[in-house]
Amino acid sequence: MSENFRLEKGGLINRNKKISFTFNGKKYFGYEGDTLASALLANGVHLVGRSFKYHRPRGFFGAGVDEPYAIVQMNRNNEVDPNVRATEQELFEGLEAKSVNCWPNVNFDIGAINNFLNKFFPAGFYYKTFMWPKSFWYKIYEPIIRKAAGFGAASIKHDKERYEHKYEYCDLLIAGTGPSGLASAYAAAKNGAKIILAEDKSRYGGSLLTSEVTIGNQSGQDWAEQIISELKSMPNVIVKNRSQVFGYYDHNMLVMSERVSDHLPKTDKYTPKQRLWYIRAKEVVISSGSIERPLVFGNNDTPGVMLSSAAKEYLKVYGVLVGKKPIIFTNNDSGYETAIEFKKNGVDPIVLDTRKDANSEIIKEAKELNINIKFSYVVVAAKGYKKVNSADIAKISDDKKVISNIENIKCDCICVSGFWTPTIHLASQSGNKTKFNEEIDAFVPSHSKQKEVTLGSANGVFTLEETLKTSFEKGSELSKQITNKENKVPIPTVVEKKSSKYDKFWCVPLPEGKNYKRFLDFQNDVAVADIQLALREGYRSIEHVKRYTTLGMATDQGKTSNLNGLQLVSEVENKVVPQVGHTTFRPPYTPVSIGAIVGREVGKHAKPTRKSPMHHWHEKNNAVFVDAGVWLRPRYYKQGNENLFEASKREAKNVRQNVGVCDVTTLGKIDIKGPDAAEFLNRVYTNSWLKLPVGKARYGVMLREDGIVMDDGTTTRISENHYHMTTTTAQAANVLSHLEYYLQLVWPELNVNVVSSTEQWAGAAIAGPKSRDVLQKLFPDLDVSNEGLPFMGYMEGNLFGVYAKIFRISFSGELAYEVNVESDHGNFMWEKIMEIGKEFNIQAYGTEALSTLRIEMGHVAGSELDGRTIPYDNSLEGLVSKKKDFIGKRSLGKKAYVAANRQKIVGVVPLDKKTSIPEGSYIVKDPKAKLPNPKLGHVSASCWSVEYDNPFSLAIIKDGKNMIGQKLYALSPLRNKSIPVEIVSSHYVDPKGERVRS
Amino acid sequence: MLYIKCPHCGLRPQTEFSYGGDATVKRPELNKEVSDQEWDNFVYLRKSPRGKHLELWQHISGCRQWIKVERDTLTHEIFTTLKANENL
C-alpha cells in the first residue's frame, strides 16, 4: 500500500489533470506539471536504483540537473531511452520507466553483495585487480564488469525519432532564467539587442520559484512570470525552456540541447524529439545559478537523504512532502527555509545546525514557529537500508573534532545543506581562469578569455538585491555596446531576509569503532576513505585522484561532489583548496543524446549523394551501384541471374570484341584559362606541355612536392589559352585546391584562372574496336577516321543538335572516345549512343568491367597511385621531363627514389591460371619462411583477364624491373592463402599499345 | 568552432575553411639549385609553435581564396587575417 505524500494544495502542478504512469511495472498517479521524481515521491517511492559500484539502494538526492542517483530507463513510443534523470523527466500519460543498474530488481539486487565485500573494492580496484592475467580481460573480466555497470542499456534498433540542428546568431545568449538571467535579459532586450534566453527546466524563474522574496510590489515568482511574458512578446527575444546550454566552445560558440518532445508521450510527425542549437553569441551571460553542497556523514547515501533545497522544491513546486519526520542538517541559513516550509505545511522538523549559535531573521522566524533547533549538532550516520528510518545524531565540539552524546532519533528523511557551490562549468569551459572565493569556499569565475560574464549566485553573489542590481546594469551595458541604444530600466526594490555567516564545517568525524561509509561522490560511489587511500598511495594531482577514484566522473561530472572532494584532498594534504585546484570542466555539462549530436545526418543523409544525369537510365537497366567517393556509379548491369563476376566479365569482353559505353561523368573536370595556362600546366605536370597544339589532348602526371604521385589524367588544349583538365574521381577536389594554392600563393604572377566544371559536363566513354562506327553515326558530318581524329585528338561536334566535345582518349586500352555534353543533355546523349550502338552490339559497362580493362592493360589508377608511389614505381618515368622543373621534381633525386632495386609495377599470374589473387596479398619468395615473412611488395589490383581467361593482378614489388619471369608466391594470411605465381609485365594485353592507335 | 574573418567575405564559421599549414614557408624558386637540406626543410620540416602562428586556410566553401590567418595555437585567438598577397 502506498502512502500519499501529496499536500492537499499548493505547488505549481495542475491538479485538474491526473496522469497515470508506471515505474518498474507498477502503476502510479501524478499530476500534469510533475516530474517523474516528484510523482514517485508523492507516492512514497524513494528506492529508484542501485549504486554504481556497491549496488547500494539509491533514492532521490536533488530535484533537477544535479541529481546523481535517480537515473532511469524510459520506454517511450516503443523506443528505449536510457540515462534519463527522473528529476528532469516531466510526467506524461502512460510514461513507462524502470530502474537501472540492478538485477533481478531494485528491491532485491544480487550485485548488492558488493556492498558487503566492499573491503575488496577499494579505490583503483579495477586497475589493481583486473590487470592479471592479461588474457582474462577481454573474455572474463570485461564482460562481467560491463554487465554489472552502466546507467541503462541503449537500444540496438535504428532510432526512428527525428533530431535537428539549428544555427543561430545573437547579441546576447543568456543561460539560465533565475533572477540574474531575467534581469540582464530584460535590460538588454529593452536596448534592442537580439537575445536568446535559455532555461534548462520547463518552468522559468530559477530560485525565484522557491524563495520567499518580494521584488517591487510582487512576489519573486510573480515578478519572474511577468518578466518572462514580456520578454516572450518582444520580437528581438527568443525564450527557450527545456534547453540546456551544455558547451562553451571557441570564439563564443555555444551549443544548447533543447528537449523538444521528451515531455510528450510521442513526437509529432514533423517535430523533432530534440534539437541541437549552435549559437554564435556576441556576448554571453552565464546565469547558471548554484547547486547546494552536501554534508558528509555516515551512510549519507541512504534513500531519504537529500539536499535541503530539493526538499523545498518538492514542497513548493510540486506540493510533495519528501518525508513526514524530517531532520534538517545544515551549516547555514538555507536549511531553515526548508524547515519553515515543512512547518507551514503541518510537519514538525528538527533542525541540526553545526554552528554553535547563529542569529538572523530567518532563524528568528523559525524559533517563533517553535521549530526544534539544535545548535552544535550533527548527523553522525543515517540508519535504515532501503530508506532512512532513524539517524544517529550527536553534539559536536567547538573545534569540530569531537562528537559526543550520540543518540538515535526516528526520522524518515534527512535534508542536508552544506552551503552553495556556484555552477561555473560554462565559464570554465570558455577558458575563464577561475579563482577561489574564501568567503564561500568555492571557485568563482575570474578573468574572461572570451566575451562572457557570470552573474548572480553562479558568480558567488547570494543576495537578491545585489544580483538584480548588477544584472540589470550588466545587461544594459553589454547590449548598449552592441546596439548603441539605452533605455534605462528602473531597478526594482527588493525585500529579502539577510543571512548569517555559514559554517565551513562539511564532514562529520567517524565515531570511535565505527566504519561508516561517508560518500563524497554519490553517482560513482566514492567515499572519504577512497580518496584517503588514493592519497596514501601517492596520487597528488587532483586530475590523477579523479581518474583513480572516479570522483567527479560520468554523467554527473561532480556537480554535487566536486568541492567536498577538493576540501578533503586539501585537508589530508595540508594545503588550501586553491592550491589543490579543480579538475577541468569539460563539455557537455549534462549528457547529450547521440541522436541530437548526429542530427539529421543519418543514413542517406550522412553525406550527399551525387548522381550522374544518366542515373535513371542505369536504374532502369538493372545497374547495381557502388559508392565512388560521394558519387553513385553503376558497378555492373545485371542480366538475368548474373552475379558480379559473370556480369563484369561479359561487359569487359564485349568492349574487347565489340563496343561498350561507360558513364564517366564522375571524372573531375577543371577548366583552365589564361595566357599563362601552358606555362602553369608545364609546372604542374611532370611532362612538358608548352608545345601541345590546339585540338590535342595529353596524358599527364602530377606530383606533390615530396615526389609522390598526386593524380593523373588527360588535359586537352581547347583553344590557344583554354584547357580542359580531367582528374580522377577521388582527387577532383584536392587537385583544384592544389592548383589554386600554386596560383594564389606561389606563382601569383601567372595569369591563369581555374574553376571546377565537373558537374557541367556529362561524359560517356565509348570503347572497343567498333567504337569508331558508333561515333561516325553519332556525328555523321565529322571526319572521325584515324587521320581525321587521331589518338589523343580532340574535336567539337553537333550531336543531333547538342554541342559535344569529343576526345580520343582511352582508359580501356581499346580504340576509344570520350564524348562530353552539357549535363542537361547527358541522358539524351546516352540514349542516342545506346540506340545507334545497337547494331554494333553495344553494351553499357560498369566500374567493375572498367577496372578489369585497365588492369590487364597495366594502366594505373587509385590503387597504385596510393600516396606512397613515385612515377618510376608506376612505370611512368617516361613522362618525367629531365629538361624542365616542376612541382616535386627536386624530391625525385632522393636516394631511396633512385635506388637500383626500387619497387616497380609488375603483372602477376597464378601458375594454375585458376586461383584469383586477393588484393592486398604479399608477394614473397618463400611462403613458409619464418614470420614476419620478408615481403617484396603487395598486390594492388586483381581482375579476371577477359583477354586470356585467367586471373591477372598488378603488384608493386621491390626490384620489379628484374623480377619478370620469376616464380614467387602471393600470400594472403587473412584468407590463409598461398598462391604460386609468375611475375610478368604489367602490360598484359596489347603491350605495344597498338589498339588505341588503330 | 573557430570564427574566421575571410578578408574577402567576412566572418564565417570554421566549417567553410580547410587548413593549409604554415604560411611562412616559402617554396624555393623553380630551376634554382637548392641543397638537400634546404629542400627537406621546405618539404618536411615545420615548426609547431605554442602561441602565435601565421597559417594558411582556404575558404573552400566560399570564395575559394587561400588566406593567411595569424592565430594563437594555444588559445585559438585570431589576431589578424590577410589576403594571399598581403604580409604581416
Image (cartoon, coloured by chain):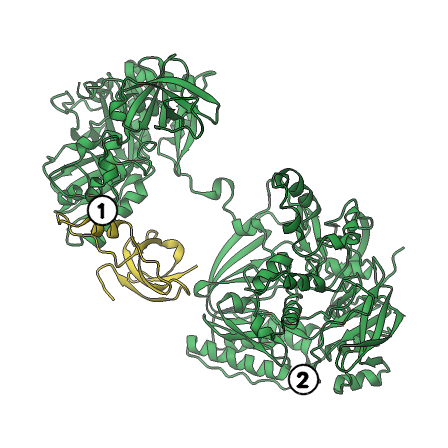
Chain colours: A green, B yellow
Q: Quadrant of residue A884?
A: top left
Name the quarter where the C terminus of chain A is drawn.
top left
Q: Earlier in the sequence, mark 2 or mark 1?
A: 2
The chain to which mark 2 is attached is: A
Where's residue A795, x and y in %?
A: 16, 30
Q: Amino acid at mark 1?
A: Val
Q: Position of residue A572 (x, y in %)?
A: 66, 70
Residue at 56%, 66% in the rendered image? A425
**Which residue, given by chain and number where applicable, does mark 1 sit on?**
A754
Front position in the image: B36 or B28: B36
Tag 2 near tag 1, CB within 8 Å: no
Secondary structure beneath dot 2 equals loop
Query: Which quarter shows the N terminus of chain A?
Result: bottom right
Report the residue marked by disc 2. Answer: A217
Q: CA gap, disc 2 to disc 1?
A: 70 Å
Label 1, secondary structure: give it: strand
